[in-house]
Amino acid sequence: MKNDSLVITAKVQIFPNKRQVIELKKMFELYSLACNWLSKKVFQNKVLNQVKLHHLVYEQMRSELGTKAQFTQSVIKTVVARYKSAKSNGHDWSLVKFSGKDYDLVWNRDYSIVGNQLSLGVSSGRIKVNFAKKPLSQFQKAKAKFGSAKVVNKLGKWFLHIPISKEAPALTIDDVTNVVGIDLGINHLATTYDSKGKTDFYRGGIVKHKRGVFKALRKSLQEKQTSSARHRLKQIGSRENRYMIDVNHQITKALTQKHPKGTVFVLEDLTGVRQATENVRLKNRYVSVSWAFYQFKKLLCYKAKENGQSVILIDPKYTSQTCPKCGHREKSNRDKKKHHFDCKRCHYQSNDDRIGAMNIHRKGIEFVSQSDPSMVIEQASVAKVEVNQPDMPTA
Ligand SMILES: [Zn+2]
């Protein structure tokens, strides 16, 4: 397996005591003060060379503002970076202002894990705070690299946002041990068919019901037009979103944990489905055009990558009308209302979501068998497989 790297941001809650909160707030204040102080100097002198700037301002800043060595250097780096990015975006010299939220803590310099606590550099030195262990523990065990973190104060709670990169194996065709076709729908949220010929259903009944309830409630609120109704409308939107996020997390987690390393998950490429009304399963529209599908895909890609698995997308054409046994394609093979598939040629019968998963699985198998064994399978790469007129085994 080749290696690839994966970056995510761990949002770690920290629990500073009252005195430490004052320290953190002081740090933000001093940081913004120092950045704005330096920003003026840079603007006046038009100097962006770090070494020159260091000579020009380092001692002065330390004596005038009372900043410590590392803090001073961090301020210089931040200010220079912001001016450079402004210039590279085509802006001419203009004064850059800082709100003080840009303080980057460098791993093992400004922040580190000491025993059970996080040690953070603040303007007066260091503080040690308790933190939520869970988001970090898995990365401490794995070979993960911690990047520059940001201290975030959100509604009175304190967090450290830490970008973490870790090596993840990239799957090649040769590594593939299992292909799982995933049919996403509303009746069953997800239906899968794997290389052992096993079908799994992930029920969507509760979601469907909840969505229906939300829809009715939303409609009645929309009709009211009062400000409290609008507020309530907003709340519902996000509650429904949270629910779908939760469901997506659960299903993608279950899928990636259930299947072994070397699994390729196959999803229908539902991008642009709205335009292509012909031959595409209409029941899936609800999922496909909303953000829920995109999030599902993103989560699956991420979790698959962590587990030495991969995700490909296939053309959704005819996946619901084609018989997975004899290859016969006919619209009336499927009875949408009864969720039933009955092949008009060979009379193979099954649940229609399962048929979808079987056809998606088959397209995945064809992609794998037609590709160069050394080819790295990119996450969610679109498989170019000509499978519209399959020559099917008659098993
Ligand atoms: Zn058939």
Image (spheres, grey):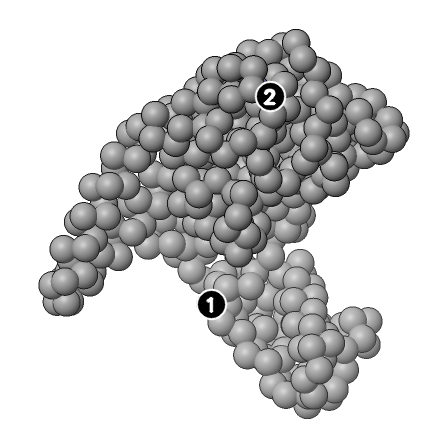
Please state which of residues 210 and 256 is positioned toward the viewer in this rendering.
210
Query: Considering only order in the chain, which callout, 2 or 1, is on the residue closer to the N terminus?
Result: 1
**Neighbour tally class for label 2: few under 14, some 14-19, many 20 plus, Cα within 10 Å:** many
Residue at screen point 61% across, 17% down = 325
Q: At label 2, which amino acid type do we have? A: Pro
Q: In this orientation, does residue 389 appear?
A: yes
Kindly report which numbered mark, 1 or 2, lies closer to the viewer in this rendering.
Answer: 2
Ligand 1 location (quadrant) = top right
The residue labelled by disc 2 is 324
Name the spot of residue 174 as percent of width and height, x first. Answer: 83, 22
Please state which of residues 202 and 285 is positioned toward the viewer in this rendering.
285
Q: Which mark is residue 181?
A: none
Q: Secondary structure at mark 1?
A: helix
Picture quadrant of residue 42: bottom right
In the displayed image of the protein, which residue is found farthest to the bottom? 44
Residue at screen point 87% across, 30% down = 372
Residue at screen point 55% across, 63% down = 102
Name the spot of residue 306 as percent of width and height, x first. Answer: 64, 29
Name the spot of residue 44 as percent of width and height, x first. Answer: 68, 90
Q: Secondary structure at mark 2?
A: loop
Residue at screen point 60% across, 11% down = 197
The CB of the residue at mark 2 lies under 8 Å from ligand 1: yes
The residue labelled by disc 1 is 29
Q: At label 1, which amino acid type do we have? A: Glu
Name the spot of residue 145 as percent of width and height, x first. Answer: 69, 39
Q: In this orientation, does residue 15 appear?
A: no
Please state which of residues 304 and 24 is positioned toward the viewer in this rendering.
304
